[in-house]
Amino acid sequence: MEVTIKPVRTLRGEVQVPGDKSISHRAVMLGALADGETKIENFLFGADCLSTIRVMRGLGVRITTVGKRVVVQGRGLEGLQEPDNVLDAGNSGTTMRLVAGILAGNPFFSVLTGDGSLRRRPMKRVIRPLTDMGAQIAARAGGAYAPLAIKGGGLRAVEYTSPVGSAQVKSAILLAGLFADGPTTVIEPAQSRDHTERMLRYFGARVEAAGTRVTVWGKPDLRGQKITVPGDISSAMFFLVAGATVPGADLVVHNVGVNPTRTGALDVLTQMGAEIELLNPKEINGEPVADIRVRGSRLTGTEIGGSIIPYLIDELPVLAVAAAVAEGETVVQDAAELRHKETDRIAAVVQVLRSMNADIEERPDGFIIRGGRRLRGAVCDSFGDHRMAMSAAVAGLTAYGETTVKGAECVKISYPNFFDTLNSISVS
Ligand code: S3P
């Protein structure tokens, strides 16, 4: 699918973004491991979370959907069944890595695979700690890539110092830790999003966290819960950058999850001079939520690096668009993890923005953008990556001429109605 974006005069309106992807995945997984029923409201019906539902069904879990609600019939910690076929995580790294943690705890054989992109993403980062805990995991290319063949069970609790600040790695180990006796600890180089920790507590597990160190106690009594998934801040960020970069824009995005381990991009945009306000703060299921208002403003370049990177890793492509529009230089560093996402997002950002006339220099762990040049519409590839497709569309809003996004159907991964919502707030 090709989508053409025309420059807009301005943006006006109110937006409700779909449910948070990270939280939707975890709600299905923990619901499956709990005793009793879990009802999930505002679930994200994006392809990635549907992959989690498909995989958990393959493990014998009954999951039904009615409107935006998902109901999971929990099977208890010991209740999953050996799958009689390969489990397919599609494009979803979160599904593959977190489910690998769950499968490591289960005394049966299973095979996890995914699409071409996922089969090129690094899996040693979860295989190593899960093997240390006692699981047997074989994988392609000397244990580097999926498919993964897993024979789990009999795990021991460990203390693991992770070389990467990654919530997927941390969560895989914490989920495996549920099946071991005693405390399992993960120490990260920089703290990553903490949705697993919050939701484990919400379901009744004992979790202690202090900075970059988190411990879960094994064999908890997990009880089915009611969960309302907040709007996804990663999806909201496309509109927040659009609102910040389009002159005269005034947008409100409602009900957005503002967990402090996810709001790095809000801090950076504010530092760049964006007018952003958080309204009506509240808490749902242990997660902070607010409405976010943004108004068009003059942005200036900034530096992005260090321990904030995991708090904004998924937003770097769209922050690069803000940096291209801003006056002055923006330096993004310490973000080599971007090369291991749905596509190599450093190479992809550089290619897209350069084709639109931005002054951008590729670095091994990020990029340098000298902003302020007027962007020019271009034909952009999505690289099959949802966040690249939406970032290119946002860049097109302030460019001269038309921008075409090729392969735009990949927005179905996290935001199936993105282009309809963008149209609804565009004033031409
Ligand atoms: C996610 C963690 C992040 C993020 C991904 C979702 C999660 O990946 O990029 O979109 O739900 O745990 P890493 O853990 O690999 O950084």
Image (cartoon, rainbow, N blue to C red):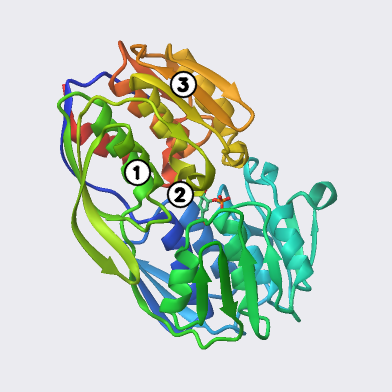
- CB within 8 Å, label 3 to label 1: no
Q: Which residue is located at x 61 percent, y 79 percent?
A: 178
Which residue is nearer to you in this view: 394 or 133?
133
Q: Which residue is mark 3?
A: 369
Horizontal placement of 114 versus 131: left or right?
Answer: left
Q: Which residue is mark 1?
A: 267
Which amino acid type is marked by label 2? Tyr
- CB within 8 Å, label 2 to label 1: yes
Residue 304: percent from left, percent from top = 47, 36
Horizontal placement of 115 versus 3: left or right?
Answer: right
Q: Which residue is located at x 71 percent, y 74 percent?
A: 158
CB of residue at label 3: within 8 Å of ligand 1? no
Q: Give the alpha-carbon distance from disc 3 to disc 1, as whole Å.
A: 19 Å
Which amino acid type is marked by label 1? Asp
Residue 311, disc: 2
Provide the secondary structure element on which disc 2 rests.
helix
